[in-house]
Image (cartoon, grey):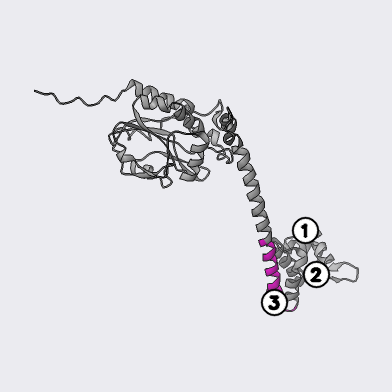
Amino acid sequence: MRISEIARRAGVTTKMVRYYESLGLITPARLANGYRDYSERDARMVREARELNRLGIPVERTRPFLACLADGRDHADDCPSSLAGYREAIDDLTLRIEELTARRSVLAQHLHEAAHRNSRAGRAGAEEDTVSHLTDLPADLPVPEDDGAAAHLPGRPVPDVELPDTTGGTVALGALGEGRSIVYCYPLTGRPDTDLPEGWNTIPGARGCTSEACGFRDHHDDLHAAGAAHVFGLSSQDTTYQQEVVDRLRLPFPMLSDPGFQLAATLGVPTFEAAGATLYRRITLVIRDGGIEHVFYPVFPPNTHAQQVLEWLRDNPAHPPRPPEVS
């Protein structure tokens, strides 16, 4: 067969066929007119070399496998020399993986140090330098619409759910004690060393978790003065992830982790899908006496939401129950 035919049958280019021939991996016959005449055996040799090369074995090192076929074996790896070739390729890959893993660790450490250098320095304005790209919101963020996904929540009793927090303990949402508790749920908090999901800015209500957290931090004392006994942030991120956020943003309140989406399952708190992951929608619950007194949904804009909650608390003071009249 001509070179174009063997290339078609083997799934390679004619240039690659000539390269295999130059290495002596195939030796076509010569016709009387001087043209090369490739055989079915040559075509199989090329296919085997191509497949081995796809596995990471250099073409030059496929020779033991092709020699095994040339000796009449049914498979190119039926010979001890072929097995040795496999082991050699595996050893090479293992070494490369170890080298790449070590290089990746060094790069990750450089990224972590660069991303957190300013916050560790403790100088004035360092925090703003570190997280400014997360707190500065685009002007054209889409506004989320009220889809009714939270309409069933006001007045509902809070289920008996315990969630881990960033202090190392757990919080029982159904037993928060007297007074009002603010639980703001959010999708995920960005970190300087972690990219946000693709298209994050185009998802209504997704962007702004860092600015929302900073708002609750800055108004924390005011919220307490207005009657909030507790303030909690809540997302599906694990506690280790959230602890980094608490430390970096210097949050004076704990974050709760709900990776198993217990609130979604027991209370119907709305979620959405992004980049193949399930996340909580941005929603804030005002919990009082074991029940949901008020719900903020949808939440927008996130960077002023803490002020919205503060104004609601001031406009709706929680008066203590009147003492019984004495006759």
* Residue found at x 43% / y 24%: 307
Amino acid at pointer 1: Thr
Residue for badge 2 = 26
Horizontal and vertical percent for residue 271?
A: 43, 40
State left or right for residue 42 relative to residue 298. Answer: right
Q: CA distance from mark 3 to mark 2?
A: 21 Å
Amino acid at pointer 2: Ile
Instruction: Name the residue nearer the viewer: 236 or 265.
Output: 236
Query: From this viewpoint, which residue is outermost toward the top?
Result: 315
**Residue stretch rendered in magenta on the structure:** 71-94
Residue for badge 1 = 13
Say whether residue 120 is magenta. no
Horizontal and vertical percent for residue 180?
A: 32, 31
What element does badge 3 sit on? Answer: helix
What element does badge 1 sit on? Answer: loop
Q: Are marks 1 and 2 in contact (CB under 8 Å)?
A: no
State left or right for residue 234 relative to residue 123. Answer: left
Query: From this viewpoint, which residue is outermost toward the bottom?
Result: 72
Amino acid at pointer 3: Pro
Horizontal and vertical percent for residue 82?
A: 70, 73
